[in-house]
Image (cartoon, helix red, strand yellow):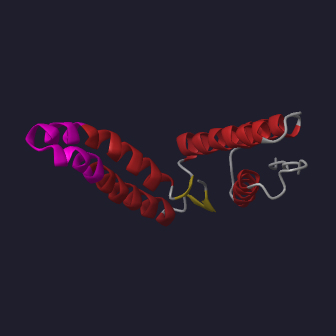
Amino acid sequence: MIIIELKIIEGTANDPTSISFRKLLSELRKKVLPPEIIESVNQNIEEINSSSLSGNALRKLIRKKREKIIKLLEKELKIVPKHYYRGYGIIMGMIMGMPLGIFGLFINAALLGAGTLVGSLIGLIIGWQMDKKAAKAGRQLDVVIY
């Protein structure tokens, strides 16, 4: 079973969202994936190919399906794009650092942003290490998704 092609719909040939989705599919074709994963990916591609949307609505659909495929791959196979864990770590670090910043507010108002900064730096470091580990294990796709 192979991953089907994404149709080039008018106006999306040079669109960054569409280009990154095609690169993701190209990288997936290089991997040996279970049939149920390929079937799920193909379903998402078929929904895009059969869509009558255009412009921003089509870009949103492509982005939504791309994220759905990435989450499926991460959950089921632990396969991720480059810098996936780094971005996730920064976001989680910011969220975890907010209470530290609020606590710092009681000490000095200048420390309000320090918690978020410290949290995001810690998240960046942890995410970077997880990305390195995934690359070493061969679980990282050679594509960057923003």
Please tell me in which quadrant of the rendered image residue 32 appears: bottom right
- As drawn, 37 above or below 28: above
Q: How many marks?
A: 0
**Residue 24 position in % (x across, y down):** 69, 55
The residue at the point 81 percent across, 50 percent down is 2
Report whether 139 appears left or right of 113: right
Main SS of residues in magenta: helix
Residue 134 coordinates in the image, percent (x, y) = 48, 59
Residue projecting furthest to the front: 109
What stretch of residues is rendered in magenta? Answer: 99-118
Q: Residue visible at 16% across and 43% down? A: 109
The verdict on residue 114 being magenta is yes
Regarding residue 126, the answer to whether it shows in the image is: yes
Apparent side of residue 57 relative to residue 69 in the rendered image (left or right): right
**Vertical comparison of 117 with 53: above or below:** below
Give above or below for 115 relative to 31. Answer: above
Q: In front: 97, or 47?
A: 97
User: Residue 47: where, in percent of width, then height?
Assistant: 81, 34
Query: Is 17 left, or right, of 115 in this rendering?
Result: right
The image shows residue 83 at horizontal and vertical percentages of 50, 58
Q: Is residue 106 magenta?
A: yes
